[in-house]
Amino acid sequence: MASIASVCRTSSRGIGRQLRNHASSRAFTASAASPAAHNFTMPAMSPTMTEGNISSWKVKEGDKFSAGDVLLEIETDKAQMDVEAQDDGQMAKIMQGDGSKAVKVGARIGVLADSGDDLSTLEIPPEDSAPSKSEESSKPPPPEKKESSPSPPKQDSAPSKPSPSSSGASGTPQKQNYPLYPSVQHLLHTNGLSKSDADTIPATGPNGRLLKGDVLAHLGHINKSAPADVSSRITKLSHLDLSNIKLAAPKEKPKEEKAAADGKKEKAAKKSPEVKNVALPIRLTAVLECQKRLQDTLGVTLPLSEFIARAVDLANEELPRTKGPATADELFDSLVGVKNVYTSSGKTSRGGFVPEINTPGLLAAAPMKAKQSGKEDIMDVLAGGKTKKVASTRATKNSMATAMAENVFSVNAKSGEEKRARVFLERVKSVLEVEPGRLVL
């Protein structure tokens, strides 16, 4: 038992001595921790963004920030956006200052460090936006592809990875920072190519993006120069060159055309028809007498304006035609086949004259509405007196006095239609002075 206890004490002393030595070695480490810094590149705020402008930095060199803090403001031709920090850290160095214009997406704009790093001993890393020349030279040269007769590719067996050829394509292989197009992904998967293989294919798309044509050219399915030719043609046609366009001098009209145009204007001014006024005095005594008889016998009052309107309508029928060409209305009526407008002889037509009367108080003097003779006032019947016919007699006498005066009827007639207008006025006069009874029915 004593021997066993001594052995245990000896082993415990050895273990304690090893722990003390290990603790002393950890406490007096001579090498310092290496601080890590990383580049801060221009972010793409949208899938179509290729470059942007730096409006202002919200942090300065040496400032610490937390996750979610705004580091800087970026503006494009469409919008202005804030860039927030994803993790805690500090700004080691600003490469692109305030107001920087046309900064490409992926270009280094600053260097970030962790919160506990010492910026005085921090090593600024090189820009890693593009592969260095040493990396490109270290890559083994691709094996040359032997040209053979075209044969359909065998997709059943495992496809071999063809090497990129830069004989016809103008694009350069570069790392694909953007997500690949679905068509490119499908083509790479079908032919057994990985994402790292896609970085070695010359890309001719915008901002170095890989297109389906680039993969087809890499596989040898199309001509090697086809993607570059299409890209150059699109680039050329996307800009409209207006530098050599000059305004054409206005063509001067020949003197003959100017003279003909001036002559047409003068003829049009001369052809404007002259309007003449044709007037005729007409008495309305017979019309008022007919109106009084109609009121006494039938108890109906026909206004004086109605007599005149009916007389005008009757006088416009079958007026003698003028020797001039047919009017637009007459030509239209003949085209649509309207009948009973012109007489069978074709020498007369309906007129459209509307006379003007120079007596303003003529229509006002005519009684608008009169009481029927059969109806008497109830007060007069109860009082046993006579009905009031004196006022009606006086109104009739006043109307007769107005009608005794000559009322001048006038119309405006175009040159050559004076005879037609005079025939119209004579018909109106004949109806109103001689036979106004025709206008009642």
Image: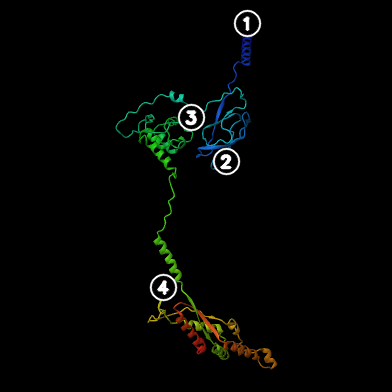
Report, in whole angstroms, how far the alpha carbon at label 4 lies from the one at label 2. 68 Å
Q: CA distance from mark 4 to mark 1?
A: 144 Å
Disc 1 + disc 3, Cβ < 8 Å: no
Residue 362 in sight here: yes
- Find disc 4 in the rendering and name its residue: 332
- List the residue tagged with mark 2: 80
Q: Give residue 130's mark.
A: 3
Identified by mark 3, the residue type is Ala
- Percent x, y for residue 235? 43, 40
Q: CA distance from mark 2 to mark 3?
A: 27 Å
Q: Residues within 10 Å of mark 2 (few under 14, many from 20)?
A: some
Q: Is residue 397 above or below residue 130?
A: below
Q: Could you tell me residue 4's position as x and y percent?
A: 62, 7
Q: CA distance from mark 1 to mark 3?
A: 72 Å
Quarter of the image for the N terminus: give it.
top right
Task: Using the rendered view, name the quadrant where residue 326 is placed.
Answer: bottom left
Secondary structure of the residue carrying numbered label 2: strand
Q: Is residue 342 left or right of residue 42?
A: left
Q: How is the image coloured?
A: rainbow
Query: Identity of the amino acid at label 2?
Result: Gln
